[in-house]
Amino acid sequence: MTRPRILFVINEDWFFQSHFLPWAIAARDAGFEAVLHAARGPAAERIEAEGIKVVAAKAARAGLVPKNLMPAARQVMGLVEPARPTLVHAFGLHGMAIASLARTMSGAFPTVISVTGLGFLAASRTPATRFASGALALAARSALDGNRTVWLTENPSDAMTMGLKRALRAGRVVQLGGAGVDIGAFTARPPLARPPLKLALVARMIRSKGVDLAVAAVGTLRAEGLDVTLTLVGAGDPLNPRAYTAVELAGFAASPGVTALGARRDVAAILRQHHAFILPSRGGEGLPKALLEAAACGLPAVVTDVPGCREFVVEAATGTIARPDDVASLAEAIRRLHAGDVDAMGQAARARVSDGYSVETVTAAVLGTYRTLTAPRAAM
């Protein structure tokens, strides 16, 4: 009997490996054939070692709309074989654009959409990008939604932003605990002496993550006499239209109290050397995996009041929350954290991430969706 196929459509292979590879491994173990359609990079060999075929996508990241969108959509159409039950799982705006065009040209196929945040569209405050965000959401919903489509979200806001009221009423929106985190790989940190208060920011070095805000807030507090440091962990992203320039990144690294480590593989060990996590996002998040990993290490977090972050962090219990794009508010949130019981908040954060945000819990929910949509005569 032919195995049903799960075709994962995403922009970059490294992003799939870092966030979603456990889902593909679980699908493989459950009897599905797992195929990845993505830009082929260094992560491809690691993915293929798990028995997951990697098809080098013809599309490339290019702002809102991928380059070579039509050739990529034709690739997807060729991988949806009439004789093999096939489900397409598209990730983010890039995957949604390719899947929507493939469905428009070939007719509906069972589809799972992972809304991994709305990116810099949601983070931007300009009328033009707000209009583009609304137009893209409408186009995606019109092309992709239907009785054989399930939407996976990471926070309660994105489904409403995308206008998925019909899917919500029909029970075709599943809210996950992010991509899930391996609780065992991120063990709780031991108690650390203070001062200084050591903050860690783990993220791609792009403007939506608010790295400049964190550096500025730490500078404000140090000027007031508070002994606080900031460690930046993460690489730049030259293909992202909102990436920091090399000059900006060098300026962050040269700021008093700031250490920039770049991309690192030992993130868990680095987190355990810090008192708290900070992510002053400007918006566009789903539910940041770095936030979950920090919580698993027993770190409370300072975040901004944006979707994903504000639902996970509980003020004064597992961290503190600041207004978005507001250095003064961010500095005050750090002060509140400093004045509180950082260790107790960290223990509460680890307990919270263990309840519904583990990779096992999230993967089980995703696998259940695959089984439902590929069952004979599946009807949603």
Image (tube, grey):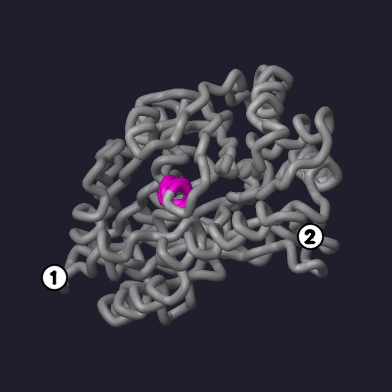
Going from N to C along the chain, the mark reached first, 1 or 2, is: 1
Q: Measuring 79% from the left and 60% from the top, which residue is drawn there? A: 379
Q: Nearer the viewer, residue 268 or 325?
A: 268
Q: Height in image: 370 above or below 14?
A: below
Mark 2 is surrounded, within 10 Å at the Cα level, by few (under 14), some (14 to 19) or many (20 or more) other residues, namely few
Badge number at residue 193:
1
Q: Nearer the viewer, residue 282 or 74?
A: 74
Magenta stretch: helix, strand or loop mostly: helix
From the viewer's perspective, is 66 left or right of 291? right
The quadrant of the image that shows the N terminus is top right
Badge number at residue 301:
none
Q: Measuring 83% from the left and 41% from the top, which residue is drawn there? A: 143
Badge number at residue 379:
2
Segment tinted magenta in the rendering: 21-28
Q: Position of residue 374 (x, y in %)?
A: 66, 52
From the viewer's perspective, is 98 left or right of 318? right
The quadrant holding residue 340 is bottom left
Q: Secondary structure at mark 2?
A: loop
**Viewer-nearest of discs 1 and 2:** 2
